[in-house]
Image (spheres, rainbow, N blue to C red):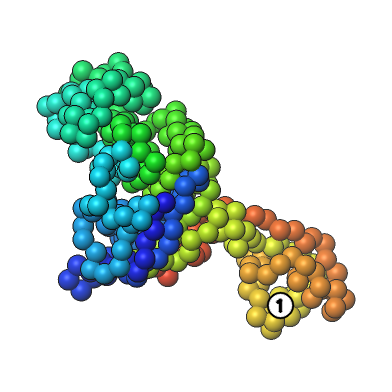
Amino acid sequence: MIELTGLTKVFGQTHAVDDLTCSIEPGVVTGFLGPNGAGKTTTMRLILGLDHPTSGTATIDGKAYRELRDPLRTVGALLDARQAHPNRSARNHLRWIAASNRIPVSRVDEVLDMVGLTGVADRNAGTLSLGMSQRLGIAAALLGDPPVLLFDEPVNGLDPEGIRWVRTLMRTLAGEGHTVFVSSHLLAEMANTADRLVVIGRGKLITSTAVSDFVSGADVIRVRSPQLELLRQLLTDAGIDAQAESDGSVLTVRGAAIEVVGEVAARNAITLHELSAQQASLEDAYLKLTDEAIEYRAVAQ
């Protein structure tokens, strides 16, 4: 288990991570989401001891990374797929990591086979595509068969088959009881992979919750009625977000249960032609929740 308690990292005047407190539990895939510049990579670097926190703690099974006796046997991580020496073969890259952590050399060929790189194991890392480099980075993370795994954008550069392979791998590892913490900007893929989400913005925790709860909170209710404007006004007066579409034929309601909308209509004898709930996508829920935390926003031309 990974536990973050009041974790804070300040660079100059910038709070890259700001009083972040949450737990990443074993047995599930936890997705790590946030806009660009939200502090996701810095948080992972703090967990791995690559940066020192200004205050607060990041622990793995109760210990800071620097206190771990056999780090690679406890935590595996992929933060940068291009970290391998370009003139060292994929196999030799893994061999020196194994030797430095007292891992049997036989494990190298095992993980190369697991990630599908056996056929290019003797090629220099600098000649590998980005997708192959991602697989090599994942192999390095798996080398010590650690119970805790961190992956920062692991599907960058992968083709659809590779993305599906990563998704299956993450879910398999979680099913075996591993702690799996993975960041990604591919929200549709996170919806298919993650069981839980940790969402941050500008270094602060926005939410830590199950994916199902995160998405259900952004459900949209669709209403059609010959008395649409009256219903919209009644809902607005009750503090409910109700907006008519541009042609005035449909009302979209957010932040209220479908039963509440129906009861308002019934109490006021409003005829309904349609009252339906449409489940929001993870992307809809994410964009709605993080809108105010976006630091780098493009301007429409």
- 284 left or right of 274? left
Q: Vertically, is 17 above or below 137?
A: below
Q: Please report the residue visible at 44 percent of the width from the left and 41 percent of the height from the top.
A: 178
Q: Kindly give the residue lying farthest to the bottom in the view shown.
A: 237
Foreground pick, 47 / 38: 47
User: Disc 1 marks which residue?
Assistant: 235
Q: Please report the residue visible at 33 percent of the width from the left and 25 percent of the height from the top.
A: 111
Name the quadrant containing residue 77: top left
Q: Kindly give the residue lying farthest to the front in the view shown.
A: 69
Q: Vertically, is 117 above or below 68?
A: above
- 212 left or right of 93? right
- 199 left or right of 108? right
Density class for disc 1 (Cα within 10 Å; few <14, some 14-19, many ≥20) is many
Q: Kindly give the residue lying farthest to the top in the view shown.
A: 119
Name the quadrant containing residue 100: top left
Q: Vertically, is 282 above or below 156?
A: below
Viewer can see residue 248: no
Foreground pick, 91 / 263: 91
Q: What residue type is labelled 1?
A: Leu
Foreground pick, 283 / 169: 169
In percent of width and height, residue 3 lies at 39, 58
Q: Vertically, is 212 above or below 250?
A: above
Q: Kindly give the residue lying farthest to the left in the view shown.
A: 87
Viewer can see residue 140: yes
Q: Please report the residue visible at 40 percent of the width from the left and 48 percent of the height from the top.
A: 181
Dot 1 lies on which element?
A: helix
In percent of width and height, residue 21 lies at 40, 66
In percent of width and height, residue 177 lies at 48, 41
Query: Number of labelled discs?
Result: 1
In percent of width and height, residue 272 lies at 83, 66
